[in-house]
Amino acid sequence: MPDISLRRIALLGCGAMGTRIARAIDSGGINAVLTHVYDQAPERSKGLVDSLKTKPIIVENTHLLSSNNTNLVVEAASQDAVKDVALSVIQNKKDLLIMSVGALLDEAIFEVLADACREYGRSIYLPSGAIAGIDALRAVRGELESVTLTTTKNPRSLSGVPYIEQSGVDLGSLDGPAEVFAGTAADAVRHFPANINVAALIDVACAGGGSTKVRIVADPSIDRNIHEVRASGGFGSMIIRVENVPDPDNPRTSLLAALSAIERIRGLCSGGIMAG
Ligand SMILES: NC(=O)C1=CN([C@@H]2O[C@H](COP(=O)(O)OP(=O)(O)OC[C@H]3O[C@@H](n4cnc5c(N)ncnc54)[C@H](OP(=O)(O)O)[C@@H]3O)[C@@H](O)[C@H]2O)C=CC1
Ligand SMILES: O=C([O-])CC(=O)C(=O)O
């Protein structure tokens, strides 16, 4: 029998996605209670807690999230947050759900976390986030010959990225689509830490070792975050395309990413029949 007792969840990051996740738990639709939260911007954690019916405790640093009596830590903060806290979560014998997946394309971190999961008997979950078809890519990874991701966003969803500023592209004056990056997934998540975690997710699913090919395009004529994966090999071929509505509170992030995290948490907290 699966253990379906009420799960105790801690949340790292109270921005656009963390807020949606917290509200979904607070609404009672998930077999869990949000017990602790942390955000480096204290006004964000306070604002979130004030808006919830069941008030979690605001802890004073990331590490206190996993030293408490929780089952699962949900990260919705940043790659730096993952690098800072992931190992101690596992060493404290909690499971971890990561949204800032780009952190895992640092090979040293991936190996350390994989070893720690084995040693402490815990799991790290990577929801499919802003993309779809991760289960299919994982299933065919032994047969893959080529995989490419093309991500197209409105310039306002790409603003403030130093790599674009340094490359001399003026996002404000584009009058059509412009490629702002072409390279590997490892380089993409390094240069665009808050924009292209999906590249890391695809790369991890395909066991690409950071080498998955990625293009990022800025297009002022679109108002969606579009991700298109083309994969082919011994299994046949597939094209996975999502046209995501951006989260109104953070246009870099797609609404689908939070919905995917919520659905994954719901599944982890319940028994029963689960598709996918
Ligand atoms: N896997 C996927 O498919 C997707 C993943 N993402 C990623 O998910 C994460 C959350 O996204 P979103 O909610 O939209 O981002 P937001 O910027 O809206 O919220 C993130 C919050 O976490 C805080 N934060 C950042 N670093 C730390 C840290 N080290 N310790 C504590 N708090 C921290 C931020 O503070 P401050 O503002 O001060 O930095 C901010 O309040 C991001 O890393 C994003 O790139 C997004 C979309 C899709
Ligand atoms: O939400 C999206 O469309 C993609 C994104 O920001 C990411 O992968 O980090």
Image: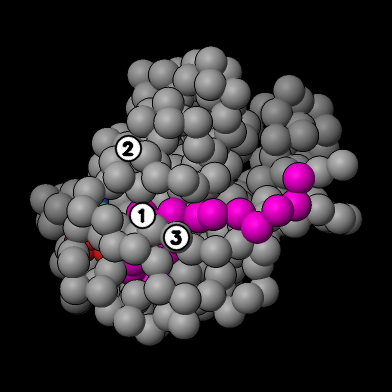
Mark 1 vs ligand 1: CB under 8 Å?
A: yes
Which residue in the structure is indicated by mark 3?
35
The answer to whether residue 255 is seen in the rendering is no
Mark 1–mark 2 contact, CB under 8 Å? yes
Q: Position of residue 43 (x, y in %)?
A: 19, 73
**Measured along the vertical axis of the image, is residue 65 above or below residue 221?**
above
Of the numbered discs 1 and 2, the one sitting upstream in the chain is 1
Mark 2 vs ligand 1: CB under 8 Å?
A: yes
Q: Nearer the viewer, mark 1 or mark 3?
A: 3
Check residue 69 in the rendering and tell me which mark sits there, or answer none: none
Local SS, label 3: strand
Q: Please tell me which residue is depicted at 25% across the width and 74% down the height of the picture.
A: 46
Mark pair 1, 2: CA separation: 10 Å
The answer to whether residue 28 is seen in the rendering is yes
Q: Nearer the viewer, mark 2 or mark 3?
A: 3
Of the numbered discs 2 and 3, the one sitting upstream in the chain is 3
Which residue in the structure is indicated by mark 2?
85
Local SS, label 2: helix
Q: Position of residue 267 (x, y in %)?
A: 71, 56
